[in-house]
Amino acid sequence: MITLASDFGSPYPAAMRGVLACKTNTRLHDVAHDLPRQDVRGSAFWLRFVLPEFPPAVHLAVVDPGVGTDRDAVVVVAGDHVLVGPDNGLLLPAARALANDQESVRAHAARVTDPVSETFHGRDVFAPLTAAVHEDGVVALRESGRLAPTDPVDLRLPDATRDNGAWHGQVLVVDDFGNTVTNVPGAAIDGVDRAWVNGMSTPTVRTFAEVSPGERLVTVGSHGYVECDVNRGRGDEAFGVAAGDTVVLHPGR
Amino acid sequence: MITLASDFGSPYPAAMRGVLACKTNTRLHDVAHDLPRQDVRGSAFWLRFVLPEFPPAVHLAVVDPGVGTDRDAVVVVAGDHVLVGPDNGLLLPAARALANDQESVRAHAARVTDPVSETFHGRDVFAPLTAAVHEDGVVALRESGRLAPTDPVDLRLPDATRDNGAWHGQVLVVDDFGNTVTNVPGAAIDGVDRAWVNGMSTPTVRTFAEVSPGERLVTVGSHGYVECDVNRGRGDEAFGVAAGDTVVLHPGR
Amino acid sequence: MITLASDFGSPYPAAMRGVLACKTNTRLHDVAHDLPRQDVRGSAFWLRFVLPEFPPAVHLAVVDPGVGTDRDAVVVVAGDHVLVGPDNGLLLPAARALANDQESVRAHAARVTDPVSETFHGRDVFAPLTAAVHEDGVVALRESGRLAPTDPVDLRLPDATRDNGAWHGQVLVVDDFGNTVTNVPGAAIDGVDRAWVNGMSTPTVRTFAEVSPGERLVTVGSHGYVECDVNRGRGDEAFGVAAGDTVVLHPGR
């Protein structure tokens, strides 16, 4: 099984599917091709959220602001899963989640040579490499010299910090509906009815319907983090925040 | 075969696909994940439109404004098809369309327990239940006690009424392109060249191209109902209506 | 293998998938269902870009401003591939790219009869025809009389012309991100640092990152043509052009 994820929109991902379908008969699952555009950190969050739900697979993921620069492709073995993509940290948070333990994450580099300007790396580099990993396996590709062990570019999603009862965090991603996912752990709002979010007193709820349409709320999302949302509205607009912005949350009354 | 439909946007549905791929090798078909958001009635319309085209399958569909409240999951057997989703009426119009006769629609409830706030019901409740229905069958799940017969929450799409030659109906859904699908039967405009729609005299056509770009038109859509559209424009804006709004149509001249 | 492409948005394409799944067990690959709406030429460009990446397949593609008018369906044999869609030129550029040589493109017509106004041609005409082509083959459909040789409506994407050092071309498509793909060949900007595009002096680059965010750039896309883009912005807005508009490019300084 191969999964595909990117920030390519449409119809570019179909070119990757075509290349894969030429080289392997395995099943292809699109994860998403509207990952946050050129946002490696936000995309890494979503991959970490989604990929662990899949059975062992080769996961192709491309969000690559550095395309055309001198960076390698990377193949990351994480437990029974293998991830393939640009060596920019994108795959590492998901890889650590997929591996049973940190030891089992091992990375290999594949040199990317870019002889012509019209190279589409998703189609011309990453899809063929993904098919080779799926069909031949990492060991064979190492023995053939196509892959070499590497110390990959790492990326760690930032942790929120706690200071005197207040949580200092960030917005990791904003989803399609304007729900803002922070890195403040859900436990922060355990047992409290309200929280101050960047100075705005906001009810903490389990379900959106506990507040009126258009009202702000704070809840714990299915990823386990605090979300700043609006019932039938956009949390990003109501709280005035975007991906990367600081969130200071005071649990309380 | 399993089909998936929801109003989850992206990338949440991939988590459901992953869970299903862990538990079954059957083929997965995405129907749509941009069903009208939190609009059970509009989403029920689309499911009734699309699902009857499929061969016998287990159909997972989740549009669930009541998530987190005390509602069960429901498994509806409809002829050779089975539908799985929240017990809020979403599945019933499609189930009646899929069943050869009304008698053959039978519903079973599965209790949803929601111990932790970060539950994502699509991933944690409905996808596993769908896989179990596909792999084990409804009979085995009844015998094991996981399912129990129930009288499900019903939903019927409203019928338009006729009064002194005028049709009183509603907009059921507005599609991606602003085409407004009403519940007025297509036969209402048989043999007439124009109709008054909420007071606006509008040509009745078979093809959009019969009017100039930007002009309003009334036609019969592939679902058999009257649509209020604009050639290369948005019908919802030109007619000033949204899903749920009243439409009064006078066939005539 | 069957691929599907259209400008239908969502959820209409699922009805085509359902019909196909009733009639064949082959794998279905969605190419894109947001092809440029009712834009046969722009959609033909994307099909020519994507379909050659696939292994031999039957390719269903529907972008059909003339739906409801008196036009046939067409089945185009192109090398080991077969394309199915409306006889409006949509398939021809991709067919020539898929065929090893021009001789091997052969077209067959299937009469479209449209007895009822609520016909959805994607679901009711093209999907069944595609399944028949896949399951029975073109030869059998010719022998049975369902297909007859035809001289299809042709479409050729326009070529840019060169006049006294300047290239006169057009915008073929604008992608999701506002990148404007022209028909000026990439070789036009070989070896030059800047180009004048409709009077705007613009750097020619290999990677977007060579200019600051928000700055205009000219580059060669993965299709081999000149694109007029903006780093982290919309090229169509910055250059003031849309699909079909004229682009005059002076390579130079």
Image (cartoon, coloured by chain):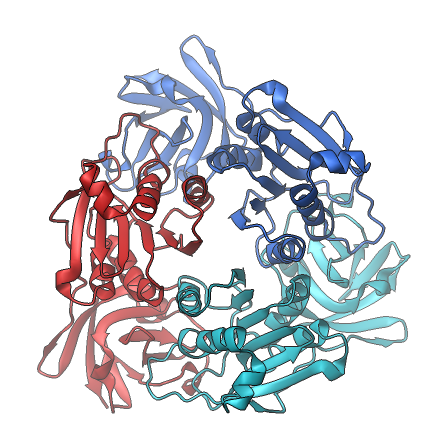
Chain colours: A red, B cyan, C blue
- Residue C100's place in the image compared with A215, above or below, is above
Residue at the far left: name it.
Answer: A164
> Residue B134, image x and y in percent?
53, 73
Residue plotted at (75% across, 33% down) = C109
- Residue drawn at point x = 32 percent, y = 32 percent: C217
Is A88 rendered above or below residue C44? below
Q: Quadrant of residue C129?
A: top right
Depth order, front residue of C155/C106: C106
Residue A159 placed where, x, y %?
Answer: 15, 69
Where on the picture, by quarter, is residue A173? Answer: bottom left
Residue at image coords 73%, 44%: C67
- Residue at left 16%, top 71%? A160
Residue C244 or A220: which is nearer the viewer? A220
* Residue A71 position by quadrant: top left
Instruction: Report the side of A124 relative to B173 (left or right).
Output: left
| Left or right of residue A18, residue A131 in this image | left
If the image is split into quadrants, where does the N terminus of chain B sit? bottom right
Quadrant where the image shows the C terminus of chain B: bottom right
Q: Residue B239: image x %, image y %?
A: 68, 61
